[in-house]
């Protein structure tokens, strides 16, 4: 039995909502001339049953992604080349706590050192965090 389907679905849904909400108008967003971004993904918390962590970057040039089961704390940093709009990135993580213990997950996406998205969850059932950020 695979546990990656809900994680992939959450990641895909985050990107669809994010891309649908992109608006080229206004000047309160990212610099439209910037084409490279230093993106850092972080997941921290207490979870003895971490199932998977995935990140995904979608742009007109294609999709770059990674996923797998990891220990906490987890982080990954890379430079995202975003020559076209829209370009977005997303992060999702799933934890299945054992023995009815309370567990927690906190996920963050930082772009050029600035926190652009953050989500925290806590509980005794399966926990999922799912974040998305528009880069341009």
Image (cartoon, rainbow, N blue to C red):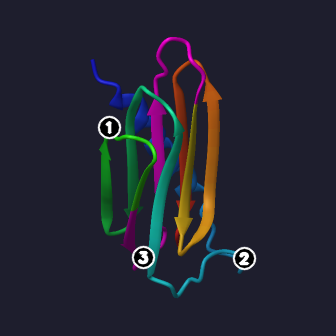
- Asked if marks 3 and 1 touch (Cβ < 8 Å), the reply is no
Element under label 2?
Answer: loop
- What quarter of the picture does the N terminus occupy? top left
Residue 27 point in image, percent of width and height? 71, 80
Dot label at residue 28: 2
Q: Reply yes or no: does residue 87 show up in magenta.
A: yes
Q: Earlier in the sequence, mark 3 or mark 2?
A: 2
**Residue at the disc numbered 1:** 69
The part of the image, by quadrant, that contains residue 4 is top left
The residues tagged by marks 3 and 2 sit, at their Cα atoms, a distance apart of 19 Å
Residue 97 point in image, percent of width and height? 49, 21
Up-down: is 20 above or below 112?
A: above
Mark 2, other Cα within 10 Å: few <14 / some 14–19 / many ≥20:
few
Q: Earlier in the sequence, mark 1 or mark 2?
A: 2
Up-down: is 18 above or below 54?
A: below
- Specify the segment rendered in magenta: 77-103
The part of the image, by quadrant, that contains residue 113 is bottom right
Dot label at residue 84: 3
Residue 71 point in image, percent of width and height? 37, 40
Q: Residue at x 46, y 23 (%)?
A: 96
Q: Earlier in the sequence, mark 3 or mark 1?
A: 1
Mark 1, other Cα within 10 Å: few <14 / some 14–19 / many ≥20:
some
Dot label at residue 60: none
The residues tagged by marks 3 and 1 sit, at their Cα atoms, a distance apart of 31 Å
Name the one closer to the observer, 97 or 111. 97
Q: Reply yes or no: does residue 111 show up in magenta.
A: no
Q: Residue at x 44, y 27 (%)?
A: 48
Element under label 3?
Answer: loop
């Amino acid at each position: 039995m695979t546990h990656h389907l809900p994680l992939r679905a959450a990641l895909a849904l985050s990107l669809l909502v994010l891309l649908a909400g992109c608006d080229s108008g206004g000047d309160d967003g990212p610099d439209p001339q910037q084409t490279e971004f230093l993106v850092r993904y972080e997941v921290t918390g207490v979870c003895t049953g971490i199932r998977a962590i995935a990140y995904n970057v979608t742009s007109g040039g294609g999709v770059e992604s990674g996923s797998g089961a990891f220990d906490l704390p987890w982080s990954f940093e890379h430079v995202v080349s975003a020559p076209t709009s829209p370009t977005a990135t997303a992060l999702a993580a799933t934890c299945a706590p054992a023995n009815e213990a309370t567990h927690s997950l906190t996920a963050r996406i930082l772009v050029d050192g600035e926190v652009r998205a953050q989500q925290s969850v806590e509980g005794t059932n399966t926990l999922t965090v799912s974040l998305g950020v528009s880069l341009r």
